[in-house]
Amino acid sequence: FLTNIERVEKICDLLIERELTNFKIVTETRAKDVVRAEPIMDKLYRIGMRKIGLGIESPNLKTLSLMNKKVVFDDVSRAINIINKNKIHSQGYFIIGHYSETVEDTKRYPDFARKLGLNQSIFMVVTPYPGTKIFNEYKDGNNIVSFDWNRYNNFYPVIKTIDMDPATIMRMLAYCYASHSRYSSLLKSKNSFKAVFDLISRLLTSYGLLRVYGLINKQDLFRIICDSFQDFVTRKIPLPSESLTQYKKKIKVRAHHSDKLNLDFIIE
């Protein structure tokens, strides 16, 4: 949408002139185009632009090169700052599971995404669609494990990498979502019920990602979720300065698995 900035500005001017500004507009674009569109961000907001998604793909330069993605991190950071400054929701897309990546490579994704300052991060799995160059690359390298087209939905791993089978990729997808959040937004909740509700919904998201495709049995699920969360359950999270102070009492949420294994979240 933002490829031709002059055209977009004319559209904005027409919409403002005719008072057609009661829209909620969402678009996806390149970081470089957002940088070029900085002078008209005010107009975009006035016509209803409320969310802009950016394809950031990977924190690993080698992966971006192999994917032929011309992503410049300086442009990405600047674009996110421009979007956020103009009160527009910033969303970033990341793709795990490139055939050259290992588990350690994948663990870089959530920290990288968080440091960019995005309002929302979406993690997906490499999906080599038929007819594309990457499909032939994966097929020739014997890295495609399923030709069931119903599974080609950007979340079900139909590929393997040099270090990860489909089940491991699924675990890493759950890890990215769990590890990405540091729960500062949870601590900004207006009341304790909202905070607990937010926490449970995040736990269920991790569970759903793992369970919905049946790649991992129930016995392993809880352990994987614990492993995904352990990066921050074992250390204190600084309380945001803008958070409310009504947490006078300790709030404890326990996900119970067995006498030997529970996952506790404590807010105080």
Image (cartoon, rainbow, N blue to C red):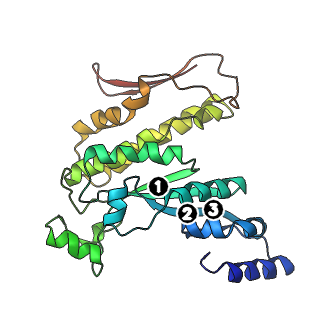
In the image, what residue occupies the spot 23% across and 46% down? 216
Marks 3 and 1, how far apart in space? 13 Å
Query: Sequence order check: which comes first, mark 3 or mark 1?
Result: 3
**Residue 147 in view, yes or no:** no
> Is the Cβ of the residue at disc 1 closer than 8 Å to that at disc 2?
yes
Element class at badge 2: strand
Picture quarter containing residue 124? bottom left
Question: What amino acid type should be assigned to the residue bearing mark 3?
Answer: Lys
Residue 51: image tag: 3
In this view, the residue in front, 167 or 3, is 3
User: Can you give x and y, in whole percent of width and height, for residue 204 in the image?
Assistant: 42, 42
In the image, what residue occupies the spot 59% across and 78% down? 3
In this view, the residue in front, 136 or 225, is 136
Picture quarter containing residue 5? bottom right
Position of residue 169 in the picture relative to residue 246 (left or right) = left
Element class at badge 3: strand
Mark 2 — residue? Answer: 53
Mark 1 — residue? Answer: 122
User: Can you give x and y, in whole percent of width and height, for residue 22 in the image?
Assistant: 77, 70
Marks 2 and 3, how far apart in space? 7 Å
> Is the Cβ of the residue at disc 2 closer than 8 Å to that at disc 3?
yes
